[in-house]
Amino acid sequence: MAQLPPGIRFITSFSRDQWYRAFIFSLTFLLYASFHLSRKPISIVKGELHKHCSASHEVEVNSYKEYAAQIQPVKKPSNISQCGWEPFDKNNYKQLLGALDYSFLCAYAIGMYLSGIIGERLPIRYYLTVGMLASGLFTAMFGLGYFYNIHNLWFYIMAQIANGLVQTTGWPSVVTCIGNWFGKGRRGLIMGIWNSHTSVGNILGSLIAAYWVSTCWGLSFVMPGVIIAVMGIVCFLFLIEHPKDISCSCTPSSSSKTFLNGTSQFRVQMPILNAKETNKPQDPEMQHLLIDSENCSVSLNSSTVVTGEGRHGTSAISFLGALRIPGVIEFSLCLLFAKLVSYTFLFWLPLYITNVEHLDARRAGDLSTLFDVGGIFGGILAGLISDRLEKRASTCGMMLLLAAPTLYMFSAVSKMGLEATVVMLLISGALVNGPYALITTAVSADLGTHKSLKGNARALSTVTAIIDGTGSVGAALGPLLAGLISPSGWNNVFYMLMVADACALLFLLRLIQKELRCNTDHTLFKEH
């Protein structure tokens, strides 16, 4: 018998369940990357919507515009003003561009609270598909303003509001799906890698938008809109919500029980037959934030962690019930300020680079992707460290503590030349996006599968929506404040971001303290 080819041996070395997990990991990665891909164009196009020009030239252009309107009707998209695209060619352009950001992010923040509650009551595949198709429509709608020569501010604001609402279908859905498929084993690292879809989507969105921004900025929106709509069809055809849907059989990797203080864990080995007969800790925050790994189903001769009834028969958790889960409020408020910083960079970094480095919109957009490259490494590093230390809050706190002085250095060094800007973009991206990535993925999944939920898998969507919805309030405030503060100088924007980082760290101090105290207690327990 001939030896099997190496490629076939590689394929057969993995089980059917492992291949399904890899498929769901890749599919949800691509699905949410397309969401961020469709959000990025507005930050790239800002440099084209408003161009710097002298006051005298602006008067001359306005006079020519009136003359051109009298002698010839508009037959194609016309942007005669060299100061940008009406109505963003005025001196108050930063406030108008900030209004676009705020309209999207405010709608996103409000919609997120409702999205998780609605999402856990509907099939994820249908819910996510409809959201992606609608998002593609409204993303392209913004770009159609170029082709139809629309200069009404409210048209663009309404497009942003509608897009912000439908995009809330994405995050609770994909986190719930990935949480169903992956247990606690190396969750921080796995989700840190998985969460790089945010940065990958931002990078691809920047490159796609930058390709057309200087020649036909309408396509900078239309093409991402088409991409996310196509991915919505892919979602409908291939997404598997839960391992039970295909009779996936996974067994717990360990019979140990895990307890938590803050986000620190210690394990007490117990026989499988007595898995249900555990002593309940007096402090509710001592309960573990994770259910056992590989909890989709278990063999018949062991205890069942998540049963079919737990998934379908258990009623969905209420909003107040989710808030009572230990750690939800603290991490939600921390994410509010962490996301404020991250989304300020997302929406204003290309324009900042344009002003400081004096680059055109395309080159500034390309350079801004380095921040997201740093974010990829930051998310993976945060997950790896939190898994090794078994301390989610402490990992976030450490990165937030380093981020504040790094932002100050970035504001000073970025004016010294392009090379210094490149280095600081990578470092700042890692430290800013690391805590944001960890909280929105591993921490959300931890809290959504908290022991107090007693295996109710339907709670994950609501918990995720509360955490990310609260964070989205900060995401809405950050770009708005940047638009209001930047006319007084970019340094003031960076001071605002440093204060936000400090506030994010402040809300984690109690959890960090409990983690450290739990670690001390665990050490003493081992010594005795």
Image (cartoon, rainbow, N blue to C red):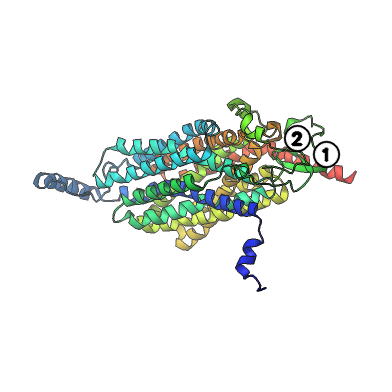
Q: Earlier along the polypeptide chain: callout 1 or callout 2?
A: 1
- Residue kind at label 1, given as amino acid type: Leu
In the picture, the quarter occupied by the C terminus is top right
Number of the front mark, 1 or 2:
1
- Nearer to us in this view, 262 or 440: 440
Q: Nearer the viewer, residue 513 or 252?
A: 252
User: Residue 70 shows which numbered tag?
Assistant: none
Residue positioned most to the bottom = 2
For label 1, the residue is: 273
Could you tell me the amino acid type at mark 2?
Met
Give the vertical position of 354 relative to 441 (above or below). below
Residue lying farthest front? 1
x, y percentage for residue 366? Answer: 42, 58
- Is residue 94 rendered to the left or right of residue 371? left
- The residue pinned by badge 2 equals 286
**Viewer-proximal residue, 489 or 283?**
283
Q: Quadrant of the N terminus?
A: bottom right
**Structural crowding at the residue carrying mark 1, measured as other residues with C-alpha within 10 Å and reported as few (<14), some (14–19) or many (≥20):** few
